[in-house]
Amino acid sequence: MEGMNNSGQFEQIEVPFKVEPHHSGLRLDEFMKTRLPSYSRNEIHNIIETRLVQKVRKLKKGTIVRTSDEVVFLYDKKEEAVQDVDIPVLYEDDHLLIVNKPPDMSVHSNNPWGKNDLIQQLRRQRNSRELYLAHRIDRETSGLVLIAKSITIASKLGEAFFGRKVEKEYTALVFGEMADDNGVIDLPICGDKKAVVRVKMTADRDSGAPSITEYTLLKRLNGFTMVSARPKTGRQHQIRVHLSAIGHPLVGDKIYKDEKLFLRFIKDGFTEELKKELLLPRHALHASRLSFKHPVTGIQLNIEAEMPDDLITFIKKVS
């Protein structure tokens, strides 16, 4: 069997995980959950006890990680079961591919042998390695992802995103009925130093980086609002931070409704108690539109993606 040594055991490969600034301050078990989201709490604790090494100190689940720390995961090199998922293609030509990513699918796996993230699924389904992510959206976020069919096109698209030449629009479902039909949220964003969850960002006029989100109300529901959000900057968690800052966190958002909910999720998973508070197992955010000039033809493309069933069902339920 591939990956087994002569003794019949799986070969262990060293996979380093480096702590980035936005993860600094997390407990080790919380950090590992961000890197291995499909693993349960008990599995994470077992990994820490038996498969994590670091030369400078003994690791425990409560160890606090800091920026530039590196832990090594002793990973069994074995085949991950293939789970093919239908990924709708909304646009394709010789240079580009635009798909509607399902929710709860990473665009790129932390597992070096992962087969079920978006890019690996597409490469396998198309029997081609020449597919490259032009940008990323969070695992829980559904919707449009732009993919290049060559390194050259990927570079051009990267420049377009960096230069803010790609218009992005998201559909969000938030708690509460918003009063204004439209508006602009102009609030600088930075890491929340007071938060227990160190990945959490916050609006901070003194220390934050300039961040602007335009929004338009789409529909008022019974205690909820469906809104179109258009980020003009690209800060981490920008839409989630901005909508929460004006009193309307996303339905299902484990961090920005109340960070204690995220800690409970890390500890126990998505329990019935969490379901009562969050209503959805993932944050209700959908990348609904991309507008940009084609990097080869110069033609303006405007691509839209329908919402997935979980959000459609929720809207019908609360309408």
Image (cartoon, rainbow, N blue to C red):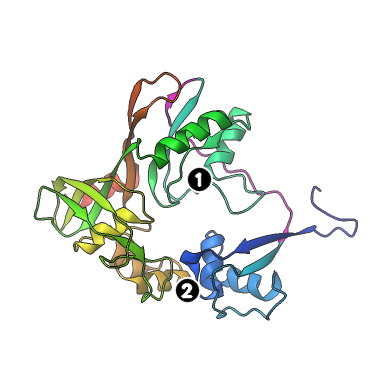
**204 vs 195, nearest the viewer:** 204
The mark lying in front, picked from 1 and 2, is 1
For label 1, the crowd category at 10 Å Cα-Cα, with few meaning under 14, some 14 to 19 and many 20 or more, is many
Identified at 51% across, 29% down, the residue is 153
Which label belongs to residue 267? 2
Q: Write down the residue under mark 1.
A: 107
Q: Is residue 167 above or below residue 126?
A: below
**259 vs 194, nearest the viewer:** 194
**32 vs 207, nearest the viewer:** 207
Q: Can I make out residue 146 in this image? A: no
Q: Provide residue 235's location: percent of width, then percent of height.
A: 36, 54
Q: Provide residue 218's location: percent of width, then percent of height.
A: 16, 43
Q: Amino acid at mark 2?
A: Lys
Identified at 9% across, 52% down, the residue is 180
Identified at 41% across, 35% down, the residue is 160
Q: Quadrant of residue 224?
A: bottom left
Q: Is residue 112 above or below residue 60?
A: above
**228 vs 83, nearest the viewer:** 228
For label 2, the crowd category at 10 Å Cα-Cα, with few meaning under 14, some 14 to 19 and many 20 or more, is some
Magenta residue check for 21: no
Q: Secondary structure at mark 1?
A: loop
Q: Which residues are magenta?
A: 75-93
Q: Is residue 140 left or right of residue 131?
A: left
Q: Is residue 288 left or right of residue 47?
A: left
Identified at 70% across, 69% down, the residue is 51
